[in-house]
Image: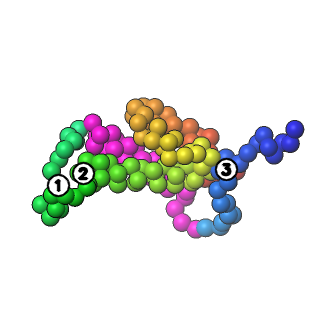
Amino acid sequence: MNFDDVMKSTNGPAYEKEEIRNGPPLEYVGEKLKSSLEQQHELLNNINACVPDGLPLPPEYSEDCPLSVKPDFLVSPAFASFYYQIIAFAALFNMLGSVSSSTEVQRLAEMPRSEFRKWLNIIEGEGSVSGK
């Protein structure tokens, strides 16, 4: 058995580069990104739970416009923001391999708040912003 086959990188096949930087500590960046993700998760779930389907389009859209307010103007951009924040958070903590597909991100979006916070804590606790 090849040890390298068993111990895969936590970032999967993602691009890696060693860097030296000055600025706010990356733990601080991770803390702020985590808080942002918690709020984005709540926003996405509130849109899905509280915004009714079938809202009328703004007057500037024609009647034959194929877009719908809730899925196209609210859910889609909120989920895209959540998706990119999840990828950034996992990458920051060198745990990008834990988010292998958009299906996985969708599963995270649908988790109850307490389960999502547990997931964030696992990434933060098991990962490392220093790559060590």
Overall secondary structure of the magenta section: helix
Q: Which residue is identified by label 2? A: 68
Q: Do tag 1 and tag 3 residues touch (Cβ < 8 Å)?
A: no
Amino acid under label 3? Gly
Relative image position of residue 59 (x, y in whole percent)? 12, 60
What element does badge 2 sit on? loop
Q: In this view, does 57 lie to the left or right of 1?
A: left
**Disc 2 and disc 1: Cα gap in Å?**
7 Å
Could you say which quadrant of the image residue 21 lies in?
Answer: bottom right
Relative image position of residue 36 (x, y in whole percent)? 40, 50
Residue at horizontal 58 percent and vertical 68 percent from the top: 22
Compare marks 2 and 1 and give the one earlier in the sequence.
Answer: 1
Give, as a single range, the part of the protein colored magenta. Answer: 22-49
Q: Does the magenta stretch include residue 35?
A: yes
**Disc 1 and disc 3: Cα gap in Å?**
42 Å
**Disc 3 and disc 2: Cα gap in Å?**
37 Å
Does residue 5 sit above or below 29 in this rendering? Answer: above
- Crowdedness of circle 1 by 10 Å Cα count: few (<14), some, many (20+)? some
Q: Which residue is identified by label 3? A: 12
Compare marks 1 and 3 and give the one earlier in the sequence.
Answer: 3
Q: Is residue 110 left or right of residue 30?
A: left
Q: Does the magenta stretch include residue 32?
A: yes
Compare marks 3 and 2 and give the one earlier in the sequence.
Answer: 3
Amino acid under label 2? Ser
Residue at horizontal 45 percent and vertical 41 percent from the top: 106
Residue at horizontal 45 percent and vertical 50 percent from the top: 83
